[in-house]
């Protein structure tokens, strides 16, 4: 299979490149292909002619997007439209990576794929608009929503370990709940979907959930770090972008179709820290 990966220098792109090495890969990031450049994307597709595109490139700075809504829109909506149009013209299947931030996280149950969305910040809104564009343009698509992602790159796990090295007390919010998900586990689910023609919308997060505080405690426990850590509430830790308080996704569609290969968040974290 000829697979084109966008955002290949990002956390998820790097893991896809590692796990999908048996396929013919074209790895692109901003330097090779700016997805917001319609003409460049069209020409790139005509030359590369991929069978599949795994579209990982995105404007992922959630707080930055609040002050730069046009920048986030350009990458997450216009960029996604360009990629979907390239897939349409060349007949490629498309995987679009989306987010739990399409939901408001106000209910205490787990969100299934067809629950009503209600994004609470610019990033979530633009990712939802990107989803809609993919649905409108392409039949053969997989929209894969994930959350609290960590892999090779800057992420919460690395931030916590760095803060532990620096010493001093650490405050972490304890009233936002989600499912920490490793890029290793997410990539397994994506590759399983690609082996099928079960197109549609999927949730793909590691099993189980916790607060950021509980996540941090588990990171320190597994890493053998004795850290002075305290739980705090969201208002004590103000950020530009509003976050959903209970952001737990149910991998219902995976279970109903190809099977859910994803490990528990604790096992995935253990693997990552090894
Ligand atoms: N991280 C999470 O917690 C999380 C949660 C849910 C969903 N997701 C989604 O999962 C996907 C992968 O996330 P990730 O954490 O791997 O993101 P990431 O590490 O930020 O990687 C995204 C990559 O896209 C590149 N990019 C940005 N603008 C571009 C453009 N105009 N043209 C081409 N490339 C561009 C970035 O380059 P620069 O670094 O140079 O900007 C970066 O290398 C994204 O779609 C994201 O929305 C992430």
Image: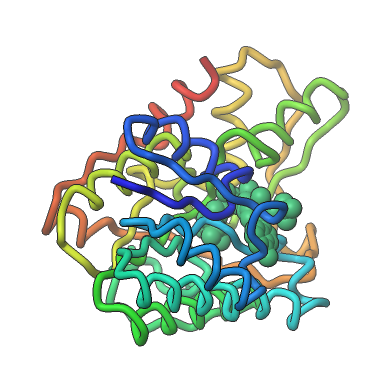
Describe residue 187's horizontal placement relative to residue 104 as left or right. left
User: Can see residue 60?
Assistant: no
Q: Nearer the viewer, residue 140 or 169?
A: 140
Q: Nearer the viewer, residue 79 or 105?
A: 79
| 74 lies above or below 34 | below
Quadrant in which the N terminus appears: top left
The quarter of the rendering in which ligand 1 is drawn is: bottom right
Q: Nearer the viewer, residue 101 or 54?
A: 54
Image spot of residue 59 (x, y percent)? 67, 64
Residue at image point 63% right, 43% down: 9
Q: Nearer the viewer, residue 49 or 260?
A: 49
Q: Residue at the far front: name it.
A: 47
Image spot of residue 173 (x, y percent)? 67, 51
Number of labelled discs? 0
Image spot of residue 184 (x, y percent)? 42, 34
What is the image's colouring? rainbow
Describe residue 121's horizontal placement relative to residue 14 as left or right. right
Q: Residue at the far bottom: name it.
A: 136
Residue at image point 53% right, 69% down: 101
| 85 lies above or below 87 | below
Image spot of residue 201 (x, y percent)? 29, 69
Residue at image point 49% right, 70% down: 83
Residue at image point 56% right, 40% down: 150
The part of the image, by quadrant, that contains residue 223 is top right
User: Can see residue 107?
Assistant: yes
| 154 lies above or below 56 | above
């Amino acid at each position: 299979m000829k697979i084109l990966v966008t955002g290949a220098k990002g956390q998820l792109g790097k893991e896809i490149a590692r796990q999908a090495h048996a396929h013919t890969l074209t790895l692109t990031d901003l330097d090779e292909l700016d997805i917001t450049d319609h003409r460049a994307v069209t020409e790139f597709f005509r030359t590369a002619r991929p069978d599949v595109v795994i579209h990982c490139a995105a404007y992922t700075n959630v707080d930055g997007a609040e002050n730069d809504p046009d920048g986030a829109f350009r990458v997450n909506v216009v960029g996604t439209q360009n990629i979907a149009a390239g897939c349409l013209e060349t007949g490629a299947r498309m995987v679009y990576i989306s987010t739990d931030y399409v939901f408001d996280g106000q209910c205490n149950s787990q969100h299934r794929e067809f629950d009503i969305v209600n994004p609470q910040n610019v990033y979530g809104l633009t990712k939802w608009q990107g989803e809609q564009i993919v649905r409108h343009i392409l039949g053969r698509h997989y929209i894969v929503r994930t959350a609290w992602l960590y892999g090779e790159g800057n992420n919460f796990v690395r931030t916590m370990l760095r803060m532990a090295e620096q010493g001093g007390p650490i405050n972490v919010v304890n009233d936002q709940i989600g499912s920490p998900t490793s890029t290793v586990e997410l990539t397994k689910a994506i590759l399983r979907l690609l082996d099928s023609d079960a197109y549609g919308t999927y949730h793909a997060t590691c099993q189980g959930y916790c607060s950021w505080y509980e996540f941090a405690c588990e990171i320190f426990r597994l890493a053998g770090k004795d850290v002075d850590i305290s739980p705090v509430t969201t208002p004590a830790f103000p950020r530009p972008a509003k976050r959903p308080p209970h952001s737990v996704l149910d991998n219902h569609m995976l279970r109903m179709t190809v099977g859910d290969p994803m490990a528990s968040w604790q096992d995935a974290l253990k693997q990552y820290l090894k």
